[in-house]
């Protein structure tokens, strides 16, 4: 399934950047630690997604939910402190200046020169921000958006074919698409924008209707949307995509806070024949 495999790969990349840890995928070094981490994340997601009547009526506050939140917070802090201690010991054991440092190791290096600024509490706070901002909020919403866009394209193969023709015309077959090409690919940009409008990743707005003709505006387009343009442009350029069967892709929505597909996308793909030689050189 596309979504779960993509999420595991993105999380693997993020945790490797944070502290050179592997908690997902294959070849996990510490299976017990990875299992505890995944269980903690699952519990944290459940607690965050719960809607409590106490949020609106304070006298109906759930003590049980509050205790679960406190426990999750304590487990997360314990995990970060352990990660900091492990990184500090690894830095003492491996005095290799050319070795690429993780985010935690960079912060600990700064602590040696500016201890009053880079305190342990500050480092733990930055790790928490990284965890919530990228690992929690950024990962799933990004993967969900990619999955929705690919699902829509699978149900409209003529749209994907037209996008591929546009890429072949502008980019050609002797190189891969890059950031500079996106400005010259209006059809691809419109596909991404329309897909995001049809299936927003965090649908918080109540049902509404425009009273006059207008255009939808994406306030965050310059940062995140450009990544989607390039990512999907690469997927369209390099691979032929097909549905598993003749049935249309099920577009039923999930029930989580971030709007996921209830049935994960399953699709078949193979490299485009015209780009096999180029892909083999990567």
Image (tube, rainbow, N blue to C red):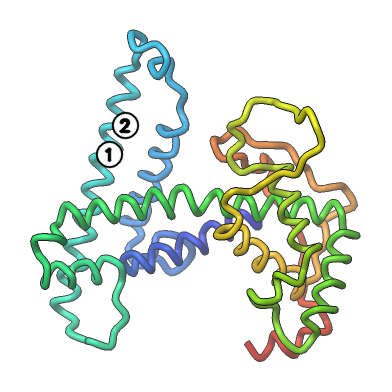
Element at badge 2?
helix
Q: As displayed, is residue 233 above or below residue 155?
A: below
For disc 2, the neighbor class at 10 Å (few under 14, some 14 to 19, many from 20) is: some
Query: Which residue, given by chain and number where applicable, does mark 2 sit on?
Result: 69
Is residue 276 found left or right of 13 in the rendered image?
right
Disc number at residue 233? none
- x, y percent for residue 80: 24, 53
For disc 1, the neighbor class at 10 Å (few under 14, some 14 to 19, many from 20) is: some
Query: Quick one: 186 or 19, which is closer to the camera?
Result: 186
- The structure residue drawn at horizontal position 68% and vertical position 88%, both measured from the top left corner, is 280
- The structure residue drawn at horizontal position 18% and vertical position 72%, both measured from the top left corner, is 109
Residue at the left extreme, as displayed = 116
- x, y percent for residue 250: 78, 43
Q: How many marks?
A: 2
Is residue 10 found left or right of 271 in the rendered image?
left
Considering the image in quadrants, where does the N terminus appear? bottom right
- x, y percent for residue 101: 29, 76
Q: As displayed, is residue 67 above or below residue 28?
A: above
- The structure residue drawn at horizontal position 70% and vertical position 77%, both measured from the top left corner, is 177
- The structure residue drawn at horizontal position 42% and vertical position 63%, both measured from the top left corner, is 14
Mark 1–mark 2 CB contact (< 8 Å): yes
Query: Quick one: 264 or 110, which is closer to the camera?
Result: 110
Question: Cα distance, mark 1 to mark 2?
Answer: 6 Å
Query: Quick one: 138 or 256, which is closer to the camera?
Result: 138
Residue 60 occupies quadrant: top left
Query: Which residue, given by chain and number where applicable, does mark 1 sit on?
Result: 73
Element at badge 1?
helix
- x, y percent for residue 192: 72, 56
């Amino acid at each position: 399934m596309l979504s779960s495999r993509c999420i595991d790969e993105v999380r693997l990349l993020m945790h490797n950047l944070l502290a050179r840890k592997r908690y997902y995928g294959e070849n996990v070094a510490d299976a017990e630690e990875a299992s505890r981490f995944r269980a903690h994340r699952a519990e944290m997601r459940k607690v965050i997604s719960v809607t409590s009547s106490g949020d609106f009526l304070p006298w109906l506050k759930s003590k049980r939910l509050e205790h679960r939140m406190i426990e999750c917070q304590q487990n997360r802090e314990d995990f970060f402190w352990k990660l900091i201690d492990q990184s500090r010991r690894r830095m003492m054991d491996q005095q290799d200046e050319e070795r690429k440092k993780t985010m935690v190791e960079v912060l600990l290096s700064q602590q040696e020169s500016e201890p009053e600024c880079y305190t342990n509490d500050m480092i733990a706070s930055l790790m928490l921000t990284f965890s919530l901002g990228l690992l929690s909020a950024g990962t799933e919403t990004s993967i969900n958006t990619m999955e929705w866009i690919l699902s829509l394209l699978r149900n409209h193969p003529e749209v994907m074919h037209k996008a591929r023709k546009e890429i072949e015309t502008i980019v050609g077959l002797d190189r891969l698409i890059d950031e500079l090409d996106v400005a010259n690919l209006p059809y691809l940009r419109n596909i991404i924008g329309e897909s995001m409008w049809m299936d927003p990743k965090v649908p918080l707005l109540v049902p509404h209707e425009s009273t006059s003709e207008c255009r939808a505006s994406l306030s965050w387009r310059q940062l995140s949307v450009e990544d989607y343009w390039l990512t999907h442009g690469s997927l369209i350029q390099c691979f032929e995509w097909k549905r598993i069967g003749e049935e249309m892709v099920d577009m039923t929505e999930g029930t989580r806070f971030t709007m996921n597909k209830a049935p994960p996308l399953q699709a078949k793909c193979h490299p485009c024949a015209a780009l096999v030689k180029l892909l083999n050189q990567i």
